[in-house]
């Protein structure tokens, strides 16, 4: 399956795995694993496709983003660069998509955490190759890899690193970073570690309810212990709300909903004006928009799609994928929307299994496809979802509508 390329030198700490002779093979392999002729056909024909009395509409932007493509390329290239008898490790999920992670594991890359874990960081030896996923990693973990003399293949997305720069800058200026994100998400953990690595502090706020609580505290003060209890696990060691909320820089996880992030910063800005006065705002507040372009494009494209007549929307992606979750949230505000990881969730025309975000659990909806006559369904997918999974979902809907998927696929080749 994997060829050995004779360029390997175990003593090299800095390597370029994306060598042209490797990348040609990697590109080919990635196309085989994740390509979809049907999705390409629909995209090339106005993002809509009708067969029988069923039509599908695709968002203009969906699926793999540049950061994810680069991370997958790097993991594939790393496995090809090193001889197959040499281990290649990855710190955790390369991206939030089970199919992609399983593919990488099956190629012979060993996971160091999570459900695919095959080894521990403590097992690493000098010269071992370790891939850092697209979300990046915490400063301490990177340091540990360097200390051990590992060869690092860094797939951290450039957009994530831009947030890190802002957060480090805040720390250097004694400004506490308030990060709009999910404290338990790999990217936000990596981002917050950038603050502490420079001796700074951070606080992670998840939603507007937490933002309002924070704003109340900024303006009126409050019970310190209650504050720390409420944000348990979401602030830096030694963070004290009575001391460290006098200068704030708002940053965000790159995949949050833009509207919500803007509202978070607007509310905190207002609170700082109330507390310190408008004329002193610059000394106490700063904000940088760090929503990534790919997340923004996918949210905009879905808003556009939702302006069209559709009976339902399928949002395809991993249930732990932040950007996919926000797409599902957008859809739910307008039409029946189902967040599914793959075609397997479309059990029958009567039963569909899908993820309920507010309850953080699976649910079953009955008679979801019980529509007589014409049906129009929309499809979008998160930045970590490959096209082949999207194709399987589309084909499954046509199949459940009684259409022959074989004839359908023949029709796009005609
Ligand atoms: S979603 Fe954005 S930040 Fe995340 S990998 Fe893709 S481009 Fe980078």
Image (cartoon, helix red, strand yellow):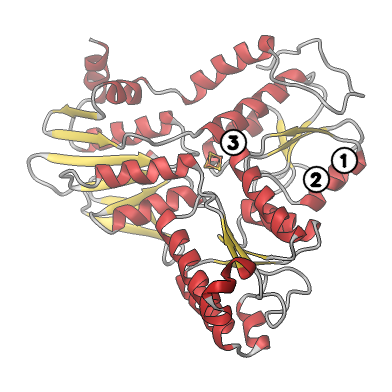
Most extreme residue toward the left, as rendered?
A: 373
Q: Residue at x 71, y 13 (%)?
A: 3
Local SS, label 1:
helix
Q: Residue at x 62, y 49 (%)?
A: 163
The numbered disc on residue 102 is: 3
Q: Nearer the viewer, mark 3 or mark 2?
A: 2
Tell me the distance, in whole angstroms, between the alpha carbons under discs 3 and 2.
24 Å
Considering only order in the chain, which callout, 1 or 3, is on the residue closer to the N terminus?
3
Horizontally, residue 326 falls left or right of residue 395, namely right
**Figure check: 103 above or below 282:** above
Q: Is the CB of mark 2 within 8 Å of ligand 1?
A: no
Tell me the distance, in whole angstroms, between the alpha carbons under discs 2 and 1.
6 Å
How packed is label 3: few (under 14 Cα within 10 Å), some, or many (20 or more)?
A: few
Q: Quadrant of the N terminus?
A: top right
The numbered disc on residue 146 is: 1
**Figure check: 143 above or below 259:** above
Instruction: Please tell me in which quadrant of the rendered image residue 136 appears.
Output: top right
Front residue of 409/66: it is 66
Q: Nearer the viewer, mark 3 or mark 1?
A: 1
Residue 114 visible in the picture: no
Percent coordinates x, y for residue 57 in the rendering: 24, 35
Residue 67 visible in the picture: yes
Q: Residue at x 67, y 70 (%)?
A: 233
Quarter of the displayed picture in which ligand 1 can be seen: top right
Considering only order in the chain, which callout, 2 or 3, is on the residue closer to the N terminus?
3
Q: Decide: marks 3, 2 in contact (CB < 8 A)?
A: no
How packed is label 2: few (under 14 Cα within 10 Å), some, or many (20 or more)?
A: some
**Figure check: 156 above or below 250:** above
According to the picture, the residue beneath numbered tag 2 turns out to be 142
């Amino acid at each position: 399956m994997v060829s050995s390329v004779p360029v390997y030198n175990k003593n090299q700490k800095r390597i370029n795995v994306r060598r042209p002779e490797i990348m040609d093979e990697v590109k080919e392999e990635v196309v085989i694993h994740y390509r979809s002729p049907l999705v390409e056909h629909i995209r090339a024909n106005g993002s809509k496709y009708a067969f029988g009395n069923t039509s599908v509409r695709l968002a203009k932007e969906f699926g793999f983003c540049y950061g994810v493509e680069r991370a997958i390329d790097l993991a594939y290239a790393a496995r090809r660069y090193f001889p197959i008898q040499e281990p290649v490790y990855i710190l955790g999920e390369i991206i939030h998509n089970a199919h992609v992670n399983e593919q990488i594991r099956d190629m012979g890359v060993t996971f160091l955490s999570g459900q695919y874990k095959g080894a521990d960081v403590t097992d690493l030896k000098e010269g071992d190759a370790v891939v850092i996923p697209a979300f990046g990693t915490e400063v301490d973990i990177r340091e540990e890899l360097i200390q051990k003399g590992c060869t690092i293949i860094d797939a951290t997305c450039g957009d994530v690193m831009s947030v890190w720069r802002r957060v480090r800058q805040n720390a250097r200026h004694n400004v506490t970073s308030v990060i709009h994100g999910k404290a338990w998400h790999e990217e936000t953990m990596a981002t917050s570690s950038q603050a502490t690595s420079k001796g700074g502090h951070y606080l992670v706020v998840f939603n507007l309810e937490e933002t309002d609580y924070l704003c109340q505290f900024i303006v009126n003060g409050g019970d310190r212990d209650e504050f720390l209890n409420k944000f348990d696990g979401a602030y830096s060691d030694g963070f004290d709300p009575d001391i460290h909320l006098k200068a704030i820089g708002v940053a965000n996880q790159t995949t949050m909903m833009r509207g919500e992030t803007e509202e978070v910063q607007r509310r905190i800005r207002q609170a700082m004006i109330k507390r310190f006065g408008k004329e002193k705002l610059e000394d106490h507040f700063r904000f940088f928009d760090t929503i990534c372009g790919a997340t923004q494009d996918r949210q905009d494209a879905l808003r556009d799609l939702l302006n069209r007549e559709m009976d339902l929307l399928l949002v395809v992606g991993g249930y732990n994928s932040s950007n996919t979750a926000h797409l599902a949230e957008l859809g739910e505000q307008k039409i029946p929307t189902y967040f599914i990881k793959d075609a397997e969730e479309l059990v029958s025309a009567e039963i569909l299994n899908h993820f309920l975000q507010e309850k953080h659990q699976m649910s079953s909806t009955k008679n979801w496809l019980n529509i007589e006559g014409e049906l129009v369904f929309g499809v979008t997918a998160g930045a970590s979802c490959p096209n082949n999974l999207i194709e399987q979902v589309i084909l499954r809907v046509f199949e459940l509508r009684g259409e022959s998927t074989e004839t359908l696929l023949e029709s796009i080749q005609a």
